[in-house]
Image (cartoon, rainbow, N blue to C red):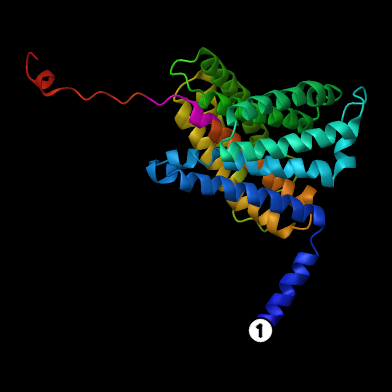
Amino acid sequence: MTTGLLGSSAIVALGAIPGDVIWSYSVAGVVLAIGLAVLLLRDEWSRARGLDKLLLLGPPFYAAPLAAFGTEHFTQADAVASIVPAWIPGHHFWVYLVGVCFIAAAFSLVTRIQARLSASLLALTFFLFVVLMDIPGWVQDPKDRIALTLVLRQLCFSGGALALAASLSTQPRDGWAETAAKIARYFIAIPVLVYSVEQFMHGDQVPGVPLNRLTPDYVFGHGLWTYLTAVVYAVAGSLLLVGKKTRAAATWIGLTVLLIVLAVYVPIGVVDRASLSKGFNFLADTLMFCGAILLLANAMPREAPLRQPSASALQPGG
């Protein structure tokens, strides 16, 4: 009887979640599962050491939310069409086209089929979003910090895809890849530093991508996560900006954001599981931000190991 009650409760709970939310979770879950399966089947996970294992999660963490947002272009077509600039004709056509492209690109990234092409096109797409929609929206009210946050978030998404395209280069000394990785570093370092300042100023609001929402009381640690994130962003973001220990800096930022996803946004996603705008999108948005940073970390050069002095050099007169 207890089992029957639990099953009935689960059905009721699932039925209370709108179809558009279920679609977003389902598509994201499929892409994430495929991405993780590929890592295991290609034996990449077992061969990676230390924090390099974390960097392997960049593509699935980036692709799963991307696929979910592509799905929302169909389940929330009217809402998405409303933010397309008025001077662009055929709003719904572009909404559906971008939705298809996002879903296709997400599967491309996790299956490694034409992944470099997909990553390059994603980088261009998000950069066009910044130029055509986000910056004009922010310019209308430069004091709107949330509008600035969205500009910088899209720039990070562009930088993450650009970093992935650079890391997939097959040439040992590819000038384009080196330039792309450098641009991606700036696309992420600058937003991270701005986010650091915002989070120091608004410690009661959610961390990671500092959007306009108070951290819920049910989140363990509450404002501690926002200030911790601000400190990590300030230190590691500065290293990224000046080009010092870039791989380690991006890795620690990515690890910090992943902890935030688990400690802050998973609980939000559970409590507000029936809402895209209040639950799923906060979780997916921050996970994609995490993925973008991990993609950057993987594109950054490894630090050259310190050379150990030889035995002869340690001898007097050696």
Which one is in front, 80 or 271?
80
Q: Quadrant of the N terminus?
A: bottom right
Q: Is residue 150 shown left or right of residue 187?
A: right
Disc 1: CA contacts within 10 A as few (<14), some (14-19) or many (>=20): few
Q: Position of residue 233 (x, y in %)?
A: 56, 33
Q: Quadrant of the C terminus?
A: top left
Q: Does 302 appear in magenta?
A: yes
* Vertical side of 221 occupied by 131: above or below: above
**Outermost residue, bottom direction?**
1
In the rendered image, which residue does mark 1 sit on?
A: 2
> Looking at the image, is 180 positioned above or below residue 53?
above
Residue sitting at x 70%, y 76%: 7
Instruction: Give the image location of residue 221, x and y in percent.
Output: 59, 53
Q: Is residue 239 left or right of residue 313?
A: right
Given residues 142 and 93, the one toward you in this image is: 93
Q: Is residue 157 visible?
A: yes
Regarding residue 206, the answer to whether it shows in the image is: no
Amino acid type, callout 1? Thr
Q: Is residue 52 above or below residue 317?
A: below
Residue 200 picture quarter: top right
Q: Which residues are magenta?
A: 296-303
Residue at x-position 72% and y-position 26%: 125
Is 148 situated left or right of 166 in this image? right
Give residue 86's position: percent from left, percent from top. Answer: 93, 26
Mark 1, secondary structure of its residue:
helix
Coordinates of residue 182 in the picture (x, y in percent): 55, 18
Residue lying at 79% horizontally and 44% vertically, measured from the top left? 72
